Image (cartoon, rainbow, N blue to C red):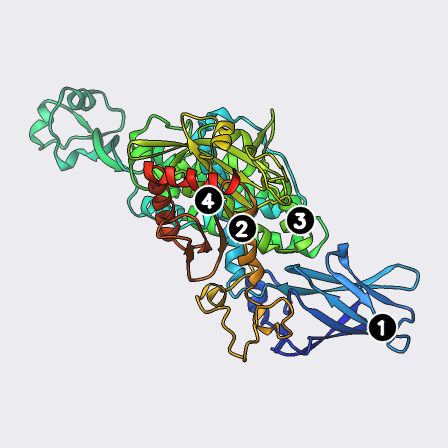
């Protein structure tokens, strides 16, 4: 790690046109990272790396007079110094951008002369793995929803060739979510180590000198076989026959691995290989470093599939003539049923488009915070499905289906809403899940909304009695709402949620005051996040809980009373981590809401606030 780095602008011939020096801000120790070429290649990153949410100064020294520097696609703020004596100097403000940052050397006439690239990395330590895991998880959750609701034969789209960098990157990440999963690898390993075998009859030749068991067929062959050998004069059977066949044919039962089920496994691997090869060919002639990265990722997957197909099992297996859907081995046997499931999902995964993915993958960027917000959406839906039934409403609201295209509607700022029911014990509740729902100001005491200003949480949950409509529940005060906000960049909330958080250690000075001068402790947590949860709970009518979802390590649930509601807090949601705490929270929540006494308390509490 270092506080400065020098990079060279070169032309096509390799001649140096200029240098740019980048300097880390004084308050950021080791603000520039230089990774090894091996790590850079493994993670598809640039060797010189700077951090997000920081301002780096730069100095350009060029052999060509009048040259300036700019960022490709304008993805990062870059401002030249206004001081006349500081020629070629300025500031790179990375903001919330994460990913590949290309700097271009521009002549005085506005022509592009050369370019170099940096990597803007997230401050989160595990963002590399988080990014891939969340993107792959979104693909898997999308396909899970489609398969839970409709049969795979319902969708008959044709493949749309999208060779844009963002489109390709989405498809590769989606496919990696399948091929790189432990489930698929274990299934393939199980099939290879314990392949399906059947006894087949095979015709074999046996020399007549080995002795034969006489049958009507063998006796006919003795009399009529073409290839024959004369019998010696002194042989006892010479008086009966003059010659005997060299060999007789027999039917023998042997174990064969050339079964329809193994042929199907080979077909699946070849289908994946064909699709990846088509992507590799499609982007091979396209310019841009981002395509070189995608191609490298594709080649890794191709190599894995080719290695699997080189196994001796598939050398013994012939080409599949038809898919054995009725096979009990394919449907039930371990390994085979998983590969069948993967294949059924494959076509959908490759056809699923996501226009909002441009906000995440465009121009080589990796918007991990936005991806986290999308990932939390699917994780919450998956978690709620353990307690609630939403039916086809999920399909019609989360996906857009046309004659030849299947699109994911998920987009920051766009409202997605669907209703269902929650059953807990013998009680039932109506439930509504909202993503980016706006609660506008209203002065009506019986209408939904905010009594102060418009509020828009990331995710909102509404519960009301099944014997009432949503509007009736609003008017009767039996509606109960909870809100959640996703905060990827937050590391910890220990100080915010500790009981003595507002007790100053410095003679009455409050380090959380809006006017506090020392902001060093506010880099990883914000008091504003807690205040925002209070704002959601207090301003949005019928709200009893508001919580932050963040990839930290500790859960916080501050409760107004001994009951689960009302409350504010922060819950951990991290890729690769189980959701045990949140599962218990929703379990307690539904137990609280379906209890008649609790519902009465909620109604009384609501009446006091809103009527």
Image height of 37 relative to 389, above or below: below
Q: Choose mark 2 or mark 3, whichever is in front.
A: 2
Q: Residue 105, percent across and down?
A: 82, 65
Which residue lies under the disc numbered 1?
Answer: 88
User: Which mark is on residue 485?
Assistant: 2
Which of the marked residues, 4 or 3, is nearer the chain's N terminus? 3
Callout 4–callout 3 Cβ contact below 8 Å: no
Image height of 541 relative to 446, above or below: below
Which residue lies under the disc numbered 3?
Answer: 284
Which residue lies under the disc numbered 4?
Answer: 380
Image height of 549 relative to 197, above or below: below
From mark 4 to mark 1, how far is it between C-alphas?
49 Å
Q: Residue 407, percent across and down?
A: 59, 34
User: Which mark is on residue 333?
Assistant: none
Residue 441 appears anywhere in the view: yes
Residue drawn at (40%, 36%) of the image: 341
Q: How many marks?
A: 4
Q: Residues within 10 Å of mark 2 (few under 14, many from 20)?
A: many
Which of the marked residues, 2 or 3, is nearer the chain's N terminus? 3
Q: Residue 488, percent across and down?
A: 54, 57
From mark 1 to mark 2, how far is it between C-alphas?
42 Å
Q: Residues within 10 Å of mark 4 (few under 14, many from 20)?
A: some
Q: Choose mark 3 or mark 1, whichever is in front.
A: 1
């Amino acid at each position: 790690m270092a506080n400065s780095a020098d990079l060279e602008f070169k032309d096509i011939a390799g001649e140096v046109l200029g240098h740019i020096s980048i300097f880390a801000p004084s308050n950021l120790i080791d603000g520039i990272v230089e990774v090894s070429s091996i790590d850079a290649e493994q993670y598809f990153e640039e060797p010189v790396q700077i951090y997000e949410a920081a301002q780096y100064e730069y100095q350009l020294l060029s052999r060509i007079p009048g040259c300036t520097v700019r960022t490709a696609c304008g993805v990062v703020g870059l401002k030249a110094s206004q001081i006349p004596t500081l020629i070629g100097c300025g500031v790179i403000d990375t903001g919330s951008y994460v990913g590949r940052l290309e700097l271009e050397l521009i002549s005085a006439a506005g022509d592009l002369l050369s370019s170099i690239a940096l990597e803007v990395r997230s401050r989160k330590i595990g963002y590399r793995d988080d990014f891939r895991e969340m993107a792959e998880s979104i693909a898997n959750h999308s396909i899970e929803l489609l398969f839970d609701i409709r049969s795979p034969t319902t969708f008959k789209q044709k493949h749309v060739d999208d060779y844009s960098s963002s489109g390709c990157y989405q498809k590769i990440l989606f496919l990696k979510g399948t091929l790189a999963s432990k489930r698929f690898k274990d299934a393939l390993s199980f099939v290879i180590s314990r392949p399906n075998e059947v006894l087949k009859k095979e015709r074999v030749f046996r020399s007549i000198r080995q002795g034969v068991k006489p049958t009507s067929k063998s006796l006919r062959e003795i009399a009529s076989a073409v290839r024959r050998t004369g019998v010696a004069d002194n042989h006892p059977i010479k008086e009966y026959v003059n010659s005997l066949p060299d060999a007789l044919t027999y039917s023998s039962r042997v174990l064969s691995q050339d079964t329809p089920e193994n042929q199907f496994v080979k077909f699946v691997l070849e289908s994946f290989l064909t699709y990846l090869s088509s992507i590799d060919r499609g982007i091979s002639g396209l310019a841009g470093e981002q395509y070189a990265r995608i191609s490298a990722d594709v080649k890794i997957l191709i190599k894995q599939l080719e290695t699997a197909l080189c196994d001796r099992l598939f050398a013994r297996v012939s080409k599949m003539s038809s898919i054995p859907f009725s096979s009990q081995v394919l449907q039930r046997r371990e390994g085979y049923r998983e590969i069948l499931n993967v294949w059924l999902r494959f076509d959908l995964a490759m056809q699923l488009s996501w226009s909002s993915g441009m906000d995440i993958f465009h121009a080589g960027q990796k918007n991990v915070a936005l991806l986290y917000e999308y990932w939390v959406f699917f994780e919450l839906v998956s978690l709620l499905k353990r307690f609630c039934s939403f039916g086809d409403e999920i399909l019609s609201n989360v996906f857009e289906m046309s004659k030849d295209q299947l699109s994911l509607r998920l987009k920051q700022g766009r409202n997605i809403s669907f209703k269902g029911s929650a059953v807990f014990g013998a009680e039932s509740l109506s439930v509504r899940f909202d993503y980016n729902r706006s609660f506008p100001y209203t002065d009506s005491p019986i209408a939904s909304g905010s009594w102060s200003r418009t509020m828009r949480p990331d995710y909102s949950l509404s519960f009301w009695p099944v014997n009432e409509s949503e509007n009736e529940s609003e008017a009767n005060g039996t509606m109960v709402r909870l809100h959640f906000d996703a905060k990827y960049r937050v590391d910890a909330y220990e100080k915010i949620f500790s009981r003595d958080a507002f007790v100053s250690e410095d003679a009455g000075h409050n380090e959380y005051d809006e006017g506090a001068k020392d902001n060093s402790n506010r880099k990883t947590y914000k008091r504003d996040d807690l205040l925002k949860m209070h704002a959601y709970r207090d301003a949005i009518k019928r709200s009893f809980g508001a919580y932050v979802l963040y990839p930290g390590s500790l859960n916080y649930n501050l409760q107004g009373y001994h009951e689960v509601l009302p409350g504010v807090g922060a819950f951990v949601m991290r890729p690769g981590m189980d959701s045990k705490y949140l599962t218990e929270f929703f379990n307690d929540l539904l137990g609280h809401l379906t209890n008649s006494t609790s519902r009465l308390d909620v109604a009384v509490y609501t009446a006091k606030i809103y009527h």
